[in-house]
Image (cartoon, grey):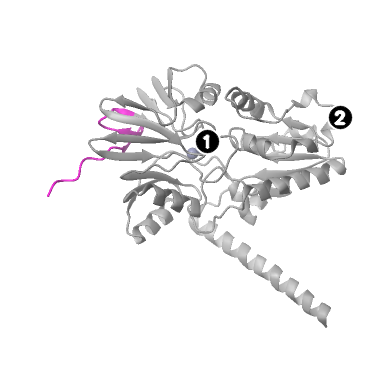
């Protein structure tokens, strides 16, 4: 019997490390060689000596960290670094996001970073990659998280915007400036009215447009007329909620675009009129679908609701474990613990069932 080969990726204090290749993936402390899955702040940090990322992400990476020693690789192409074959494959999370495939000594590992399996007009779709070990996130790794089809969400935003515009008030959507904001812009019906974006969103829009993404025309607040301010859609980062910048729109309705908006508690915590359930992370079925498609007998979970997913996979007969990382959540408003999320979802389900019973009672009254 042969001993199992040493792991191709291990957790070190600086980040996830590939020993034979002597490089890190999405390190949280400065290192010599950093492979980057995508340009969100918890995965792409300044201070590394050399960077390698997917070619599709070049513009957004540069717009996030400025001038760096950056090499890029088109999706699907391979480079060999100290005997490790490295390639990037679409993760469907944001523009340029990639799963990183490592092959060495006959073994294949995939580090998926953040990913989603659902559609997104602003980036290449998630591509399953077969491997021996699949390293996955678990941001929404509880069975309660199941996304509604994105077109229904965009239709809801459009209807809300149209009604607000008719009533002479702005419609403010809070969305993370990198990824979510562009997905919202690409998904809504731009014929409804003018679109105003915050400067942080405008910067990323520019990187997206330079990368070939089709986004509708947007303007800065200073370029909008008073009439336009009264019927526009506004896309702004969550940090602007309650700011002087937001108050310039006068009478308005606001909403938040995030997977957490599936929970009433999250909508209350964000204190917004509307919650639009739109996530750039996989929901529970999406996580399981990606894991199954990898055909990996071993799965390592990095961040999110780690324990529930590790336990579930072990129950399915997979070898499962976790890496302690410093990856965070691009979408806040989350419940503190898995138990809290499950409790909130259960309370929502009871409330929904209560609504159904009330409706039923009204029906019976009508018959009577
Ligand atoms: Zn991310
Ligand atoms: Zn992340």
Name the residue carrying label 1: 124
Q: Which SS class for mark 2?
A: helix
- The answer to which image quadrant residue 52 occupies is top left
Q: Which residues are magenta?
A: 1-23
Residue 149, can we see it? yes
Asked whether 3 falls inside the magenta stretch, the response is yes
Is label 1 in contact with label 2 (beta carbons under 8 Å)?
Answer: no
**What is the x, y in percent for residue 146?**
56, 55
Q: Is residue 251 above or below residue 349?
A: above
Residue density around tag 1, few if under 14, some if 14–19, many if 20 or more, within 10 Å: many
Cα separation between marks 1 and 2: 38 Å
* Total marks placed: 2
Residue 83 relative to residue 89: left or right? left
Residue drawn at x 73%, y 28% is 217
Q: Tell me the number on the disc at residue 326.
A: none
Q: Earlier in the sequence, mark 1 or mark 2?
A: 1
Where, quadrant-wise, is the C terminus in this rendering?
A: bottom right
Name the residue carrying label 2: 226
Q: Which SS class for mark 1?
A: loop
Q: Is residue 87 above or below residue 4?
A: above
């Amino acid at each position: 019997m042969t001993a199992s080969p040493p792991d191709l990726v291990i957790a070190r204090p600086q980040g996830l490390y590939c020993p034979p290749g002597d490089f890190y993936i999405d390190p949280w402390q400065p290192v010599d060689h950093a492979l980057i899955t995508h340009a969100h702040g918890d995965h792409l940090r300044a201070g590394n000596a050399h960077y390698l990322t997917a070619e599709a992400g070049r513009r957004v990476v540069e717009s996030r960290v400025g001038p760096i020693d950056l090499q890029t690789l088109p999706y699907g192409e391979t480079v060999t670094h100290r005997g490790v074959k490295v390639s990037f494959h679409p993760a469907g999370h944001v523009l340029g996001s990639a799963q990183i495939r490592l092959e060495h000594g006959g073994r294949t590992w995939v580090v998926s970073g953040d990913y989603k399996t659902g559609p997104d007009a602003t980036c290449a779709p998630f591509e399953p990659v077969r491997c021996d070990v699949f390293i996955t996130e678990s941001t929404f790794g509880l069975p309660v998280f199941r996304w509604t089809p994105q077109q229904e969400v965009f239709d809801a935003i459009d209807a809300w915007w149209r009604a607000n515009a008719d009533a002479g008030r702005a419609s403010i959507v809070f969305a993370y400036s990198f990824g979510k904001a562009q997905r919202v812009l690409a998904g809504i019906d731009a014929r409804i009215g003018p679109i105003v974006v915050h400067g942080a969103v405008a910067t990323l829009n520019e990187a997206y447009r330079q990368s070939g993404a089709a986004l509708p025309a947007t303007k800065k607040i200073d370029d909008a007329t008073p009439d336009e301010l009264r019927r526009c859609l506004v896309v702004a980062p969550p940090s602007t909620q309650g700011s002087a910048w937001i108050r310039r729109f006068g009478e308005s309705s606001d909403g938040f675009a995030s997977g957490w908006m599936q929970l009433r508690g999250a909508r209350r915590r964000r204190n917004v009129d509307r919650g639009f359930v739109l996530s750039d992370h996989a929901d529970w079925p999406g996580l399981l679908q990606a894991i199954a498609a990898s055909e990996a007998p071993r799965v390592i979970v990095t961040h999110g609701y780690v324990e529930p997913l590790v336990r579930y996979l072990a129950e399915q007969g997979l070898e499962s474990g976790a890496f302690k990382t410093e990856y965070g959540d691009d979408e806040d408003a989350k419940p503190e613990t898995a138990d809290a999320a499950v409790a909130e979802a259960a309370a929502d389900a009871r409330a929904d069932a209560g609504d159904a019973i009330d409706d039923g009672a009204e029906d019976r009254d009508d018959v009577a």
